[in-house]
Image (cartoon, rainbow, N blue to C red):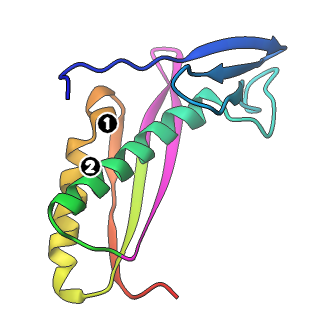
Amino acid sequence: MSEEHSYNVNLSWKEGRIGTLRSPELNEEIEVATPPDFDGGVEGIWSPEHLFLSSVSSCFMTTFVAIAEYSKLSFEDLQVKATAELGKVDGKFEVTKIRLNPELMISDEKFADKARRIMEKAEQACLITRSIKTEIIFEPTVTVGILQ
């Protein structure tokens, strides 16, 4: 595997504050718009803010799964809740804080400490969170149970 990777996204303006994202590497497209919190915003369509937050949570998930597989940690379920806080810094909006709340379910209590360590390692290794300046508040939870 090469040490350098490249990803491509193309945006086409559709109308008003709406555009369509496509990638030559992917089959699906995503409609994107200004969020309804802003003038001219559109409800019910993914916004840049949603996509930014999605990149953080999905990067955590993919990194966690890779480390868990390598570490031979089996788990029942993983749910990742993420919230972005937007605020003004020097008079301009930016994402000032992200709360990342992964909830991991394992079937055996004896692996709880290992699971927590792997979750923390995944948060630290995620290339997206390492690439942004936003503060990440990481609050993982490990529960024991079996999915029905």
Q: Is residue 89 above or below residue 116?
A: above
Please tell me which residue is depicted at 52% across the width and 14% down the height of the picture. 91
Residue 17, position as x, y percentages in the image = 78, 17
Q: Secondary structure at mark 1?
A: helix
In the rendered structure, which amino acid carries the disc numbered 2? Glu
Q: What is the number of callouts on the image?
A: 2
Q: Residue 13: give its label.
A: none
Q: Is residue 74 magenta?
A: no
In the rendered structure, which amino acid carries the disc numbered 1? Thr
Judging by the rendered image, the residue that carries numbered circle 2 is 123
Q: Is residue 106 above or below residue 6?
A: below
Please tell me which residue is depicted at 67% across the width and 29% down the height of the picture. 29
Q: Is residue 121 above or below residue 54?
A: below
Verify CB contact (< 8 Å) between mark 1 and mark 2. Answer: yes
Quadrant position of the N terminus in the picture: top left
Report, in whole angstroms, how far the alpha carbon at label 1 lies from the one at label 2. 8 Å
Work out whether mark 1 precedes mark 2 in sequence or the reverse, and give the earlier one.
2
Please tell me which residue is depicted at 16% across the width and 87% down the height of the picture. 110
Q: Is residue 85 magenta?
A: yes
Q: Is residue 81 above or below residue 44?
A: below
Location of residue 128 (image quadrant): top left
Q: Residues within 10 Å of mark 1 (few under 14, many from 20)?
A: some
Judging by the rendered image, the residue that carries numbered circle 1 is 129
Residue 78, position as x, y percentages in the image = 42, 66
Question: Which residues, given as a range, are shown in magenta?
Answer: 76-98
Residue 122, position as x, y percentages in the image = 24, 51
- Is residue 121 rendered to the left or right of residue 19? left
